[in-house]
Image (cartoon, helix red, strand yellow):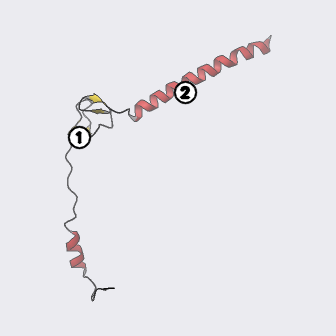
């Protein structure tokens, strides 16, 4: 198996890696909420792409989850009320 004859110097190694720099990404504003986004990507803040609602956002999911939990608590409270009234009689 071939093995290098000499150690590669730091200068040669680093000059080879010097061309691997990161490119600056272009940014635009969302047409719906004016949040900063990358072009051709769904907005994470409002879930819109090209003026249409595409995705449900994290905040919307949390609000819906809260409403579901509140409804469940109300239902369980209604179930427990008749039991409490029956015990009182």
Q: Where is residue 47 in the image (x, y as percent from the top left)?
A: 32, 33
SS state under label 2: helix
For image coordinates 20% across by 55% down, the residue present is 23
Residue tagged by mark 2? 69
For image coordinates 25% across by 29% down, the residue present is 32
**Residue contact between numbered discs 2 and 1, judged by CB atoms under 8 Å:** no
How much space separates mark 2 and mark 1, taking CA atoms? Answer: 36 Å
For image coordinates 24% across by 34% down, the residue present is 30
> Taking 20 as reference, is 33 above or below it?
above
The C terminus is located in which quarter?
Answer: top right
Badge 2 or badge 1: first in the primary sequence: 1
Residue tagged by mark 1? 40
> Taking 64 as reference, is 10 above or below it?
below
> Taking 4 as reference, is 33 above or below it?
above
Q: Where is residue 76 in the image (x, y as percent from the top left)?
A: 64, 22
Q: Nearer the viewer, residue 70 or 51?
A: 51
Residue most extreme to the bottom: 5
In-image side of 11 versus 60 (left or right): left
In-image side of 81 versus 25 (left or right): right
Q: In which quarter of the image is residue 84?
A: top right
Q: Which of 87 and 42 is in front in this view?
A: 42
């Amino acid at each position: 198996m071939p093995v290098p004859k000499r150690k590669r110097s730091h200068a040669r190694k680093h000059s080879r890696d010097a061309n691997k720099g990161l490119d600056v990404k272009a940014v635009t504003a969302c047409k719906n909420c004016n949040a900063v986004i990358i072009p051709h990507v769904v907005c994470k803040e409002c879930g819109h792409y090209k003026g249409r609602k595409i995705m449900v956002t994290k905040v919307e999911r949390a609000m819906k989850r809260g409403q579901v939990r509140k409804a469940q608590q109300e239902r369980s409270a209604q179930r427990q009320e008749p039991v409490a009234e029956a015990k009182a009689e």
